[in-house]
Image (cartoon, grey):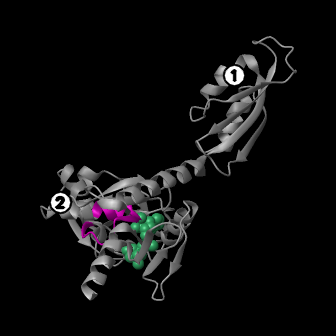
Amino acid sequence: MQRNAAASARDQLRDRLRIAIQKSGRLSEPALALLAAAGLSWQESRDKLFYYGESLPIDLLLVRDDDIPGLIADGVCDLGFVGRNVLVEQDYERQSRGEAPAFRELRGLGFGRCKLMFGIPDDWEWDPQAQLPGTRIATSYPALLSRWLAERNIEASVVTMSGSVELAPRLGQAELVCDLVSSGATLASNRLKPVEVVLDSEAVLAGPAGAIADARAGIAELLMRRLDGVLKLRDSKLLMFQAPRAILPHLMQLLPDAEPPTVMSLDGGTQTRTDGDVALQALCHGAMTWQRLEELKRAGARGLMVLPVERLLA
Ligand code: ATP
Ligand code: ZN
């Protein structure tokens, strides 16, 4: 009887998808917000290790971000939300040990953006081929940095540190750093300047290198479709304006990320098809910045209005 219960618990586990997310840190809140926007709701366990999914058979495991690729590799979790920097670093590490790829990026998620960059003393000019040989470079990303150096045949020492990398030059442990930068303020306060990008990063949805097995494959697909919908909607805006009909083709060229627009005549139908003014509305999928609106206005659009989109069902 007990054996049956254990076996059925294992089978049930296979029917539920398990996603690893960061327990506390920069990626935790945005990851939970994205999953909630995709329709997930959950109940927290007392020890805050698991969140049990209520609306869908998807459970969350709350861990340190560095553990997420390994949990996917070991099959403990099916998916994970993790920085591309962590995923690529651990992938390169595995490759350098001769291990097969065990996880991969499935989607960029558009939050947690940062860059892995070289930071050099304020008074240096950046000339890597001449400058880097023989130097010590402090980093938390030794595999990424070593590959960058090897690709350029540059021989320098990689000094691996787990945190406070930006202090290394002041402490005499290294001459320069290769560190994550978002605003650059941390580098600046240590008299360093960012000079070259090694990796452009954001949070990604990571999954196994191979396919997800059994019933979980269908759940993963459903989740990814919903995530795609949410991510697409995040950047989508409804743009409305009026303009002379004759310049519409030109205006639409300024909106390469717009869906085919709805065009309404402003005169109740007395105009010909080629003259007069029209009102137009179009769903746009890129950021609708002030610069873009000003460009449209200069080109002849009037009464520009940008509206948020609440839900989208294609
Ligand atoms: P954990 O306790 O989970 O190991 P951590 O200290 O490694 O936490 P955070 O500082 O919360 O992690 O960063 C998580 C991720 O956020 C990074 O791996 C990176 O992808 C992203 N990120 C975005 N901006 C920055 C930044 N300015 N500095 C560091 N990470 C950033
Ligand atoms: Zn970490």
Q: Is residue 33 above or below residue 307?
A: below
Residue at 71%, 26% (x, y): give it: 299
Three-letter code for the amino acid on which mark 1 is drawn: Leu
Give the label on residue 95, or none.
2
Identify residue for label 1.
248
Give the label on residue 123, or none.
none
Q: Which quadrant holds the C terminus? A: top right
On whether ligand 1 comes within 8 Å of the CB at mark 1, the answer is: no
Total count of labels = 2
Q: Is residue 267 above or below residue 38?
A: above
**Quarter assignment of residue 195:** bottom left
Classify 10 Å Cα crowding around label 2: few (below 14), some (14-19), many (20 and above): some
Instruction: Using the image as rendered, state which of residue 305 and residue 8 is in the foreground.
Output: 8
Left or right relative to 293: residue 8: left
SS at mark 1?
helix
Which residue is farthest left? Answer: 98
Give how far across and how far down residue 94 sits, in percent.
19, 64
Q: Is residue 108 above or below residue 32?
A: above
> Real-space Cα distance between discs 2 and 1?
53 Å
Is-magenta flag for residue 79? yes
Q: Which quadrant holds the N terminus? A: bottom left
The stretch of residues the image draws in magenta is 73-89
**Quarter assignment of residue 17:** bottom left
Residue at 70%, 29% (x, y): give it: 262
Three-letter code for the amino acid on which mark 2 is drawn: Gln
Ligand 1 - quadrant of the structure image = bottom left
Give how far across and how far down residue 248 sits, in percent.
69, 22
Residue at 46%, 84% (x, y): give it: 48
Classify 10 Å Cα crowding around label 1: few (below 14), some (14-19), many (20 and above): some
